[in-house]
Image (cartoon, rainbow, N blue to C red):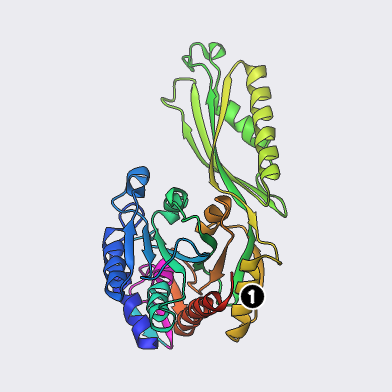
Amino acid sequence: MKDSLVETLFNLIKLDGQSRAERPVADFIGQKMKALGYRVEEDLSANSVDGNTGNLLCFPPHFRADRPAMMLAAHMDTVRPAWQAQPVVQDNVIRSDNNHAIGVDNRAGCTVLSHAADYLLRQHAQEANIMFVFTVCEEIGSKGAKELAVPANVIMGTVFDCSARPGTFIQSTFGAKQFTLEIHGKSAHAGVDPEKGINAILLASNIIAGLPVGRVSPDLTCNVAKISGGGPINVVPDYVRVDGEIRGSDREQISSMLQRMKELGDKVCQISGGMFSLSTESHFSPYRIDENSQIFQLVFRVLSSSGLTPNPIHYPGGSDANVFNEKGLPSINVGIGAQRPHSGGEFIFVEDLIASYNIATKLVDEFSAANW
């Protein structure tokens, strides 16, 4: 199994497939799943995400819509192009030989699930009511997952996309909202009539200076990431845009921070005569999986039986699991050991690739044997 897993991962790494351009990866996975006997459906999310590929939904031959089902998921896109990478195995570590990101986030997850799909048909062809999903555009805000229509009989999901080593799983996460501040001042000649102008850059500076930026509290962060605006040096700038992000453990924290931002912006601009607007976009919502829930108990049991120490964590990042939970599908993101993601130093231990496969197959075993 080791050689087969490594071979599939290397084949996937060689395929170009950044967000909105996952077609080569989807074709590879789709052909592999069809060859195994799966019914493969590609949804219409490509239109919504402005890409060339939709999500892949893969159903085993005996999948029944009238019985409870589980979903196993991974995403096909990478942040950086991985096809230029030269993956090698050195000392049982899969890494790049030329300092290019190799895309183990999340080609490792795709590898694991494609092999688990083969295991399912070999061991549980009749009774396993488990579907496999490969999403697009996870790296740009889980846009594919947001467009996914999860079948009504799916009662839980497991996402194979956490960079932590196998054994760790994400029980709860922060949520994140992007914010955009637009500050309108008034232009004037900076040398002749500066008194007639309202400097939008100065207004933006006053607003930012009044914000708590960085780690606001243990469970709340605020980041001002980008400032754009201004113009010729002899003109009082009349427009500035500020982009950033707020992350928090619950929606109330995030909303409170945004309200504070709005009140501050209104106050600064009211004093100066400028105008201010605040717009937001949700990247992902926070979630917390109850320890008594079916999915928590299943994952905990599977990790224990795999010889691993279950380690539930609270994590500040997001994944497709956030979207699935927001849709009402209890889902957990499990560690697969794809470490230092998005960097030229990206790597995964061969033993972690194998351990992740074992987790997936035990999930198949446990779910198939249970009376849901």
Quadrant position of residue 78: bottom left
Quadrant position of residue 82: bottom left
**Residue 77: percent from left, percent from top:** 37, 59
Give the answer, above or below, for where 333 lies relative to 260: below
Say whether residue 231 is magenta.
no
Which residue is at a point 46% across and 83% down the rendered structure image?
354
Q: Which of 173/65 is in front?
A: 65
Q: Is 324 left or right of 215, judged from the image as shown?
A: left
Residue 82 seen in this snapshot: no
Say whether residue 99 is magenta.
yes
**Residue 1: percent from left, percent from top:** 39, 87
Which residue is at a point 37% across and 43% down the rendered structure image?
48
Quadrant position of residue 252: top right
Q: What element does badge 1 sit on? A: helix
Q: Residue extending furthest front?
A: 66
Q: Which residue is mark 1?
A: 300
Q: Amino acid at mark 1?
A: Phe
Residue span colored magenta:
91-110
User: Which quarter of the figure is the C terminus placed in?
Assistant: bottom right
Give the answer, above or below, for where 270 lies relative to 225: above
Q: Give the class, few, some or many, for how many residues have Cα within 10 Å of label 1's Cα (few <14, many ≥20).
A: many
Q: Is 55 left or right of 208, judged from the image as shown?
A: left
**Residue 238: percent from left, percent from top:** 49, 21
Which residue is at a point 54% across and 74% down the rendered structure image?
367
Q: Which of 236/220 is in front?
A: 220
Counting labels gives 1
**Residue 13: percent from left, percent from top:** 32, 70
